[in-house]
Amino acid sequence: MAKAIKAHFDMKGLKELDRKLRGLGPKFYQQVTKKALVKGGAVIVKAARANIKTVQGGIEGEYLPTGMLRKSLGTVFRQYPAKHLGLVVIGARWGKQFKSAVWQSSREHIPAKIAHLVEYGHGGLRPAPAHPFLRPAWDTKQPTAMAVISGAAEKFFKKIRP
């Protein structure tokens, strides 16, 4: 079984926006936070999908389903009301729509189980080098994502306070 690798990214510079959102009350705070963070996460997902390279063929003629990791990338919003915290998790999603039977094998190819192996590489009998796709997307698109988050929240403010 593959080990999960956790990473924490903190976007700084949005303290004033957060203060304004909290002043609106918990219902508006949750609504705006979700919409804004999901839109910002979509920017990172789009860049990560562009970074993934597909491989045709495989070892000894084995069929390799291509593009499934790319299709499985997405965002999931998590809300923690007790802590007044909302966050977006970006990565390979789990679900039946992303499973595919591998040819000549009864095993299933589940992209969420191999995403970290593609990102960081692995050793073993058939070692593979790292092919980072998520971290470079984060590094290049973080300022754009922050602008999208701020823009979405400001747009919501203009709607409720013209």
Image: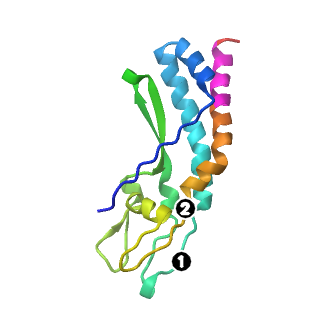
Q: Is residue 56 left or right of residue 156?
A: left
Mark number, residue 139: none
In the rendered image, the vertical position of residue 61 relative to residue 4, given as above or below: below
In the rendered image, the vertical position of residue 43 relative to residue 120, given as above or below: above
Which residue: 52% across, 18% down? 28
Q: Coloured how? A: rainbow
Q: Picture coordinates of residue 137 (x, y %)?
A: 61, 52
Is 24 in front, or is 123?
A: 123
Which residue: 50% across, 48% down? 74
Is 154 in front, or is 142?
A: 142
The residue that label 1 is drawn on is: 56
Q: From which residue to which does the magenta span run? A: 150-160
Q: Nearer the viewer, mark 1 or mark 2?
A: 2
Q: Picture coordinates of residue 139 (x, y %)?
A: 62, 50
- Residue 68 makes an appearance in the image: no
- Residue 37 makes an appearance in the image: yes
Which residue: 66% across, 11% down? 161
Task: Locate residue 38: give its quadrant.
Answer: top right
The tag earlier along the polypeptide, 1 or 2, is 1
**SS class of the residue under badge 2?**
loop
Is 96 in front, or is 41?
A: 41
Give, as a three-letter code, the residue at label 2: Pro
Task: Locate residue 148: give its quadrant.
Answer: top right
Which residue: 31% across, 77% down? 105
Q: Are marks 1 and 2 in contact (CB under 8 Å)?
A: no
Is 117 colored magenta in this rendering? no
Give, as a three-letter code, the residue at label 1: Gln
- Residue placed furthest toward the right: 162
- Residue placed furthest toward the bottom: 60
Can you say which quadrant of the picture contains the N terminus? bottom left
The residue that label 2 is drawn on is: 132
Q: Is residue 135 left or right of residue 143?
A: left
